Image (cartoon, helix red, strand yellow):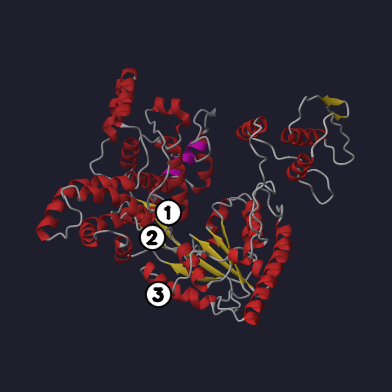
Amino acid sequence: MIRFGAITIECANPNPTLFVHSLSFFSSLLNVRSGLCFSCDSALKTTEVKDLQLLTYMDKDESPQIARRMTRSSASASSSASTSNNVPVAKVNSLEPLTVNDLLVGGGTVSLDDIISSFPGRNNQILELVRLLGPLNSPMLPLFVYGGSSAGKTSIILQLFRHLNRPLVYSSCRTCHNQRILFESILNQLLLHRKSAANGYSNAKRCERPSDFVNFLREALTNVINNLKEKSDKLVSNKTIEKEIGNMIYLVFDNLQLVKQWDKSSTVLPLLFNLYDMLKMPEVGLIFISGTSPDTFYSNMGYVEPIPIYFPDYTEGDIRLILLRNQANQKLYSSFLDVALRPFCRITRQVGHLSAALKPLYEKYCEPLSDKGVVPNEDMKRRLFSHIKPHITSSLNEIFKVSSLPSTEVETCKEKRWKANPKRLGQLEEIGDLDFHMSTTAKYLLISAFLASRNPATLDASLFDSKGGSDNRKRKRKPSEKVLEKKESLEEELLMKGPGTFPLERLLAIFQCIVSVAEDPSNDEEQNNDGLGVQGGNGGLMSDVLLQLSSLCNANFIFKGRSCPIEGSNRYRSTISEGLALKVARSLKFPLSKYLYRR
């Protein structure tokens, strides 16, 4: 019998494990921190007392901590274990404590020549990074590594630290999606803290405010630097062959451009860029990795500007060398790249996207071959090219794909709408026919440019709100004669001026909004009434929009002007008519009229 104040539990033959779980549960329920009094009719054996001491986790004040909440699976597992007499008591797995060696990049040593050969076209960037990192224990200014996605920025940084055998703390702003998670992730690594069941999977420090983070960071960095100095002194005194890791510690912040999307980005970004001045610790190096240029991070707060290192996009020759690596038959794959790589490079230069798009195409290329280890001659190359030529165009359309309704569902929707209103559907189909082929992404980009040229920039927030487009159902007052005259004069002025210009940032923002609206299936009823329904998929954009924009500029659908002396960036203008924009929108089943401002 167990008594907790007024609560009494009776048990005939108390199992020690079940007894401990019941004790922990009721002690946490009653919040009994000290002075716990209980009695049991059956005396515990000596071994049972040892099990009680093992399974009860005590803090420094010798008071039991509140047990972690159990899930259904863990509760069922513990109950099944407690009911069986043959199952031994579970023990907490004892993991080895972390040391400063765990801050090194694992995988063994690698030479600088191997790194250069592994990343074609990155020789200058690798040597520049090695020069700026300097020899062992040399202070450094903050570095800002930037470039497009799949340019090898993060991989090269990690491989260089593996080559130099220096400790670093790596944090990605993609996985650490807010400032608290970012702060606690850095502190966990510096304090050599590992989340486990023993500590309830808790962090070393709970840190939400930037001021607390700076204080905790300075304290943790001081401890790590002291440990590194002690380790270096021991290596020197013992004269061991082990490679010295030095006294420097490096903080690497990856995907820094994502911080701008956080709620408190206005305080986090200045904090990160001012760490060099606030810490004033020469043993600490800062490296920022971003997908955008340093110009997008400028603020009014003064700080030491990081040294920029630009990673340009891979050239076609570099991509060819990368794709040829790890191929069983490089000569056969090289003949395949001769006919397939150039069209795909006009759409995207991202190695991951190209590799995924070319893989099924290469399997089609090898279908006529009985032996994939053969070395192709000129006659075989021509036959293989004739076999794969019809599949290249369809594969190009799949590279940048915005999901839409299957053809069977489209025909079903057309039949329903034809029965409801045959005249209106006939007009829509007549407008929706295009005389040329254009990828889905280029169509959305063309619509975005048309809207940016026709709509005032001040109305973007109201037109592209969460409800999707402007609300045409609000009550309108009858305009006066002066208002009508002013409206006519504005229309004449607009006709004389023509379409307006817009910066690249505004174009990309509108593009992202209309694609997300087209992929959102939540407003099905309204879309079906308009005959413009688009069913969403994963929504992943698989190509570089800038290359599509360049193609539209070369085709004179969009005019690219000179750079603005005030803004310092190029401005664009749509050159298509409203009729052509309606045709493109109808082919996508996109409600263009909802987003077009009518004066």
Residue located 84% across and 49% down the image: 61
User: Is 485 colored magenta in this rendering?
Assistant: yes
Task: Tell me the SS state at disc 3.
Answer: helix
| Residue at mark 2 to residue at mark 3: CA–CA distance | 44 Å
Query: Could you say where residue 475 lies in the image, as x and y percent from the top left?
Result: 54, 27
Q: Amino acid at mark 1?
A: Thr
User: Is 475 colored magenta in this rendering?
Assistant: no
| Residue at mark 1 to residue at mark 2: CA–CA distance | 9 Å
Where are the magenta residues, as a range? 483-491
Mark earlier in primary sequence (1, 3): 3
Query: Callout 2: 10 Å neighbours few (<14), some, many (20+)?
Result: some
Mark earlier in primary sequence (2, 3): 3
Q: Which of 440/275 is in front?
A: 275
Q: Is residue 105 left or right of residue 535?
A: right
Query: Could you say where residue 68 lies in the image, as x and y percent from the top left?
Result: 70, 40
Q: Which of 294/239 is in front?
A: 239
Query: Callout 1: 10 Å neighbours few (<14), some, many (20+)?
Result: some
Is 153 drawn above or below residue 483 in the view shown?
Answer: below
Query: Could you say where residue 36 lies in the image, as x and y percent from the top left?
Result: 87, 37
Q: Which mark is residue 113?
A: 3
Kindly identify which residue carries mark 1: 501
Query: Could you say where residue 50 lies in the image, as x and y percent from the top left?
Result: 76, 44
Kindly identify which residue carries mark 2: 561
Tags 1 and 2 touching, CB below 8 Å:
yes
